[in-house]
Image (tube, helix red, strand yellow):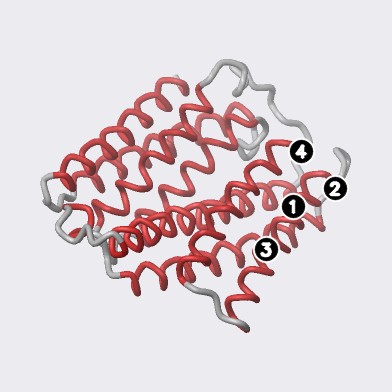
Amino acid sequence: MDRALLIFSTLLALLGAVWGAVSVHRGLRTRWTLVFMAGAFVLQLLFLEERGQLRGACPLRDRGEIMVFLAWALTMFYLVVGRPYRLSLVGLFTAPVVVLFQVVALMPGVMEISPERSVGVDAWREAHAAISVISYGGLALAAVTGVMFLTLDRQLKEHHLQSGLFRNLPPVRELLAAVKRLLWLGYALLTFGIMAGWMMEHRGGWSHLLAAMLVWLLYGGLLSWQQWRGVTGRRLSLWALVLFLFSLGVFAWV
């Protein structure tokens, strides 16, 4: 049942991506992308609730569950933060990422088919895992918004001013402000996640917490650079994307 929920959620996100792309190509705005993504969000919640019941804990015990939790967090941030912007465009850039994460989760061997029930759940460990992954939803949307900024910046430089994509993208100033806010929000949540990590028992070693600390330091360095020295919108957007991809690699390795 949980696998069926994930498949249908992935299909709804895919529909959101396709519908958004078709609408933009025609130069139209649509709220159907928002509807499809909201439906995917509900199915993600049902999936995570079912896996949580099977686990008897927060469903973050294997890489498949982590990918779905991350997709859920990204979708949540899109639904909350994307509303002030032109929804079809935020969804157009967000939905494919959600689809990618969930397709990876559905690949054979990535997610346990019959998960074991957890015994002796550590509340601090649960908080560390959940808040850290939720923070990645904000950082992921910062990367997605950065891609939108880079796309608009390139279209401006190449004078593609009549395309449907250009006409529907939010102004560069709004996109840059969104990148900054999402980076700070994701960083603040990651900070709380790491604080919970220091309080939990470390029976399984320190590798994940040290990886989170490395990511925290890198994002902190970027935000400090932006705050005190100033960074161009293009560099900030590019680094938001690079750091997010790098951080995914770090956690996949540990």
Report the Cα–Cα distance between label 4 and label 1.
20 Å
Query: Is the Cβ of the residue at disc 2 closer than 8 Å to that at disc 1?
Result: yes
Q: Residues within 10 Å of mark 3 (few under 14, many from 20)?
A: some
Query: Is the Cβ of the residue at disc 1 closer than 8 Å to that at disc 3?
Result: no
Mark in front: 4 vs 2: 4
If you read the primary sequence from the N terminus, does the residue marked by circle 2 or circle 3 appear first? 3
Report the Cα–Cα distance between label 2 and label 3.
16 Å
Q: Residues within 10 Å of mark 2 (few under 14, many from 20)?
A: few
Report the Cα–Cα distance between label 4 and label 2.
18 Å
Q: Amino acid at mark 1?
A: Trp
Q: Which residue is mark 1?
A: 124
If you read the primary sequence from the N terminus, does the residue marked by circle 4 or circle 1 appear first? 1
Q: Amino acid at mark 3?
A: Phe
If you read the primary sequence from the N terminus, does the residue marked by circle 3 or circle 4 appear first? 3
Q: Residues within 10 Å of mark 4 (few under 14, many from 20)?
A: few
Q: Which mark is residue 201?
A: 2
Q: Secondary structure at mark 3?
A: helix
Mark in front: 4 vs 1: 4
Q: Secondary structure at mark 2?
A: loop
Report the Cα–Cα distance between label 2 and label 1.
8 Å
If you read the primary sequence from the N terminus, does the residue marked by circle 1 or circle 3 appear first? 1
Q: Secondary structure at mark 1?
A: helix
If you read the primary sequence from the N terminus, does the residue marked by circle 4 or circle 2 appear first? 2
Residue at x 59%, y 26% (from the top left corner): 54
**Farthest residue, direction bottom:** 228
Residue at x 38%, y 34% (from the top left corner): 43
Q: Which residue is mark 4?
A: 254
Mark in front: 3 vs 4: 4
Please state the horizontal and vertical placement of residue 171, each as a whole percent of the image: 28, 70
Relative placement, left or right, of 31 versus 134 is left
Mark in front: 1 vs 3: 3
Query: Is the Cβ of the residue at disc 2 closer than 8 Å to that at disc 3?
Result: no
